[in-house]
Image: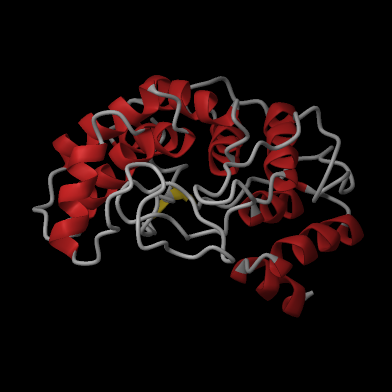
């Protein structure tokens, strides 16, 4: 693994590990103007979204049932009883941890959320990366894209790029934007795969279309045309990317 080429920026939230590569994209020609960033094109299938555990509608980012980490929408909010098991929704850290332990045996999202708790030492649990990896593997095997991504991150952090890319590809097949972005970065720097600027650009565009601000910023860095690069930075800045906003102020 080319450690000098890849740097890590860690930010773990209550739902999933969102640690991503933060290395700036190297300059390369031929990235092209923004094409369909924000929708369509690039060969990516339409993004598939999980549904609210209560109403089946579009979930709100960061909203999930405490007991099993299934997504919720802002309209429904957290119900008093879990629609999955009908038990009262726990509120204390100890009760949430116990509920996740029970649900993790047959619920991928619960196993993944419990894995994050062990990885961070949350919910009153002692930090245990080995246990976190076991839970990520269990959830990843059942198709949880965020768990597949988290598992890939653990392998990459351990210098096992081929195994990491296997799980990034699995998550990317489900349109998990951070995993598509990580695959693009692997091709940009030749980490675990032959360096390929064209493949990196294609994957960055796909990740950007799936909502990745990091990918939009990387495309701006790859783009030799200043006007087209600015368009990418605008997309990234609107999604909250600080470096893209800084690039716009400087330009």
Q: Is the residue 154 above or below the residue 251 in the image?
A: above
Q: Count the marks: how many?
A: 0
Q: Residue at image x 85%, y 61%? A: 231
Q: Position of residue 129 (x, y in %)?
A: 17, 41
User: What is the quadrant of the C terminus in the image?
Assistant: bottom right
Q: Is residue 159 visible?
A: no
Name the side, left or right, on which 33 lies relative to 16.
right
In the rendered image, the vertical position of residue 102 relative to residue 80, given as above or below: above
| 166 in relation to 217, above or below | above
Q: Colour scheme in the image?
A: secondary structure
Q: Position of residue 126 (x, y in %)?
A: 8, 53
Q: Residue at x 44, y 51 (%)?
A: 18
Quarter holding the N terminus?
A: top left
Residue 107's x, y, as percent?
A: 34, 33
Nearest the eye: 169 or 198: 169
Is residue 127 visible in the rendered image? The answer is: yes
Q: In front: 102, or 229?
A: 102
Q: Could you say where residue 61 lies in the image, as x and y percent from the top left?
A: 54, 58
Of all residues, the one furthest to the front in this rendering is: 86
Which residue is most to the left? 126
Horizontal side of residue 138 vs 167, given as left or right: left
Residue at position x 47%, y 25% in the image = 165
Look at 69% across and 44% down and name the residue there: 210
């Amino acid at each position: 693994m080319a450690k000098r080429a890849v740097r890590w920026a860690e930010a773990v939230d209550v739902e999933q590990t969102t640690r991503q590569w933060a290395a700036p994209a190297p300059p390369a020609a031929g990235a092209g103007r923004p094409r369909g960033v924000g929708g369509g094109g690039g060969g990516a299938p339409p993004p598939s979204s999980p549904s609210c555990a209560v109403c089946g509608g579009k979930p709100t980012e960061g909203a999930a049932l405490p007991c099993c980490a299934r997504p919720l929408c802002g309209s429904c909010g957290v119900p008093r009883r879990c629609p999955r098991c009908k038990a009262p929704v726990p509120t204390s850290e100890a009760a949430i941890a116990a509920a996740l332990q029970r649900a993790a045996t047959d619920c991928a999202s619960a196993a993944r959320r419990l894995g994050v708790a062990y990885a961070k030492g949350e919910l009153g649990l002692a930090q245990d990366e080995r246990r976190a990896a076991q839970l990520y593997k269990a959830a990843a095997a059942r198709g949880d894209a965020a768990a597949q991504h988290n598992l890939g991150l653990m392998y990459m952090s351990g210098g096992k790029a081929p195994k990491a890319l296997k799980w990034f590809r699995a998550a990317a097949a489900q349109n998990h934007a951070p995993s598509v972005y990580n695959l693009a970065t692997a091709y940009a720097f030749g980490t675990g795969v032959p360096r390929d600027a064209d493949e990196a650009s294609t994957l960055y565009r796909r990740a950007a279309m799936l909502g990745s601000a990091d990918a939009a910023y990387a495309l701006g860095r790859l783009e030799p045309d200043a006007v087209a690069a600015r368009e990418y930075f605008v997309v990234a800045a609107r999604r909250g990317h600080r470096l893209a906003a800084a690039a716009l102020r400087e330009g």
